[in-house]
Amino acid sequence: MTTNDSKRLATLKSLIDIGKSQGYVVRAEAAAMLSAELLNEEQVADVLATIDDMGMFVVDDPPTAKELAAMKTPSVSATPTPAVAPPSLGPAIGAPIVVLKVGAEGGEIRRIAQELATGWRYRYSMFDQSDPLCIRA
């Protein structure tokens, strides 16, 4: 790893640390930090997009405490959701109908609808000629 690579890595780590501690990164401040180490604006935009994907907000101006609280998403509960049995579909009223068929070289996909006493049921079937055992319904 060259000295420039080490500097870039240190800059990225410090930017991520700032984002984690504040919950956000100000775009202009991040661009100023990164432009010294990165070559162009496209690379800076890629890094900011990655930071945003990591769950840290990239903002134009520092948010107020109230705005920051509104931006944060609620935490996910570790309590598992109880399993619920699916409702009974009821008896079929009509025959299955192919409502969409898309074919191309090597196979096809079909969307199939069937009227039941409780509504409509949809399913798909796929035929792949590259694998003779791959037929799903």
Image: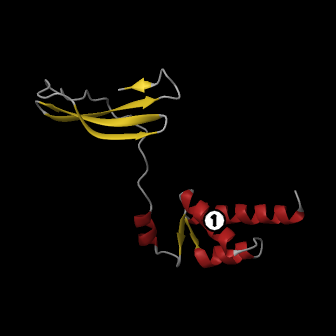
Q: Position of residue 47 (x, y in %)?
A: 65, 65
Residue extending farthest front: 105
In the rendered image of this protein, does residue 132 appear above or below residue 3? above
At mark 1, the secondary structure is: helix
Q: Quadrant of the N terminus?
A: bottom right
Residue extending farthest right: 2
In the rendered image of this protein, does residue 124 appear above or below residue 31? above
Q: Residues within 10 Å of mark 1 (few under 14, many from 20)?
A: few
Which sits in the foreground, 86 or 128?
128
Q: Quadrant of the C terminus?
A: top left
117 lies left or right of 28: left
Q: Position of residue 104 (x, y in %)?
A: 45, 40
Q: How many numbered discs?
A: 1
Name the residue: 53% across, 78% down: 60
Amino acid found under the numbered disc labelled 1? Asp
Q: Position of residue 4 (x, y in %)?
A: 85, 66
Q: Which residue is mark 1?
A: 46
Which sits in the foreground, 130 or 137?
130
Residue 34 quadrant: bottom right
19 lies left or right of 90: right
Residue 67 quadrant: bottom left
Residue 98 quadrant: top left
In the rendered image of this protein, does residue 37 appear above or below residue 51? below
28 lies left or right of 34: left
In the rendered image of this protein, does residue 45 appear above or below residue 73? below
Name the residue: 82% across, 66% down: 7
